[in-house]
Amino acid sequence: MAIKEQVIKAQKRQIQLTSTLAKVGYDSAIGKLLRLRVYYLDAFIMLRKLKSFLETAKENIGNKFFAVDQAIVNTSHEDVKEIMQVEPQLRGNDLGIIRILAPSYLLNNPLSLGMNGTEHSGARAIFLQALPEPSEDIKKISSLVDECLSEAAKKGELHIGKDLPRMILKILHELVFQISLSDKEITASNNFIQRLSLASLPNFISKYLLWIITSPVIKHRKYLIEQYQSSSKWSSYFAIGSRYDLNEHQIANILFDMIHIAGTAGSSALLGSVIGVLCLDEELRNRVTSEVNDIWGEQTSLNSNALEESKLINKTILETARLYPAVRFVSQLAKEEGEIEVGEVKCPFQKGTRLLGSILTANRDSQRYENPEEFNIERDFSDILSWNGQEHERACPGRSLSIGLINIFCLYLFKQYKWESTTQVEWELERVTAVTPNDLVLQGFAKR
């Protein structure tokens, strides 16, 4: 069936469900069952054809439409920005379109992204304490980046999809906890990230029927949480969390999610996309190389001003984040019932309905960006929606470290390292997972 037919059929199914839910109740037992059915039906399409699904729905239905579990998807820059900036936010235990239905995968701990009120304030306070300002800790971060790239040089290649997540996992554990993970531990952490989609299955299936797959990663999560609490930095995180009535279990799990989900999955994807952009655009790569050489000069190490001086690299990172956002969706819950017009049909929605903002389409909105499909580093990035914007409750507390870390990788890659050739650069825009050219390999990778 063509994607247009699939989308229209899915939308009719969703519209019919709105009136039924109004009668039986959105969160009633039957309401949840009915929503679960359409969730999996839509998710099956979107997991394989996300960009096509969103663009087709926007073209044939409008800027707002239903998808997955009766969520209202907003696709325009203006509407997604509004969702991000509504305060206070009311969140569900979700990752974009993915609902966390197997709490056992997370040790029965809610995602920090799904917390509300005092708990969420506490999580943000812990994040701000744990995540260093890159310009103030540039010596240590640079050393870790160089160490990771040196290991890739020993193999003679840098594989974007396989190597970068492992590098970010290693670096973040060093920065946040001063813990050095072994190769085996890094592999286990990476497996946890790769299998996160299993948490979207009902708990019985994820915990019991798929226990051969889920048991090892859950065991690893328990192990790392114990290691976190023996870190020399643990007391400072516990002191902050306890002010917000968070216990040790909550604090450790919050930090686990920060490192593995927001930190590694997001930053490694964006880093991979930046490398991909620079591999494809020879003119931009030459300009970046020139800037890198000017910043390094005759120094043997980077100084604290290096990140501020990397103006071209920073623009490249921002435009890459716009065109290839590591996070595809932002969501919150409706605080009261209401009605929206989907196509030409007026549909009721209930309190608690998910309001999804499609960052991927919002970042390519022609009403906000001229020639939005083109890569252009001279754009106005003042209200870029990647990292959930700035200066409000939803803004990502790791934005500065993410950009700084990617910046330092670029400085080292184009000054201290070289490669002979690359494989084809392709972005996986149709997949729900973070956008990045996972199959890209820098071949003949070596130190200069």
Image: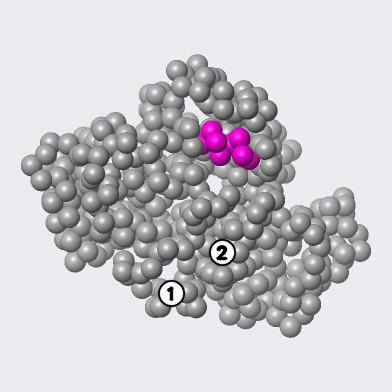
User: Residue lying furthest right in this view?
Assistant: 23
Residue linked to disc 1: 369
Considering the numbered disc 1 on the image, is that residue within a helix, a strand or a loop? loop
Q: Which three-letter amino acid code belongs to the residue tagged 2?
A: Lys
Locate the N terminus by quadrant: bottom right
Considering the numbered disc 2 on the image, is that residue within a helix, a strand or a loop? helix
Cα gap from disc 2 to disc 1, whole angstroms: 14 Å
Question: Range of the magenta residues?
Answer: 120-127
Query: Residue 258 appears at what percent x and percent y?
Result: 52, 38
Magenta span: chief secondary structure: helix
| Relative to 411, 63 lies left or right | right
Is any part of residue 25 visible from this angle? yes
Residue linked to disc 2: 81
Query: Residue 104 appears at what percent x and percent y?
Result: 68, 34
Q: Which mark is residue 232?
A: none
Using the image, determine if residue 108 lies above or below residue 428.
above
| Residue at image location 25% in from the left, 59% down from the top | 312
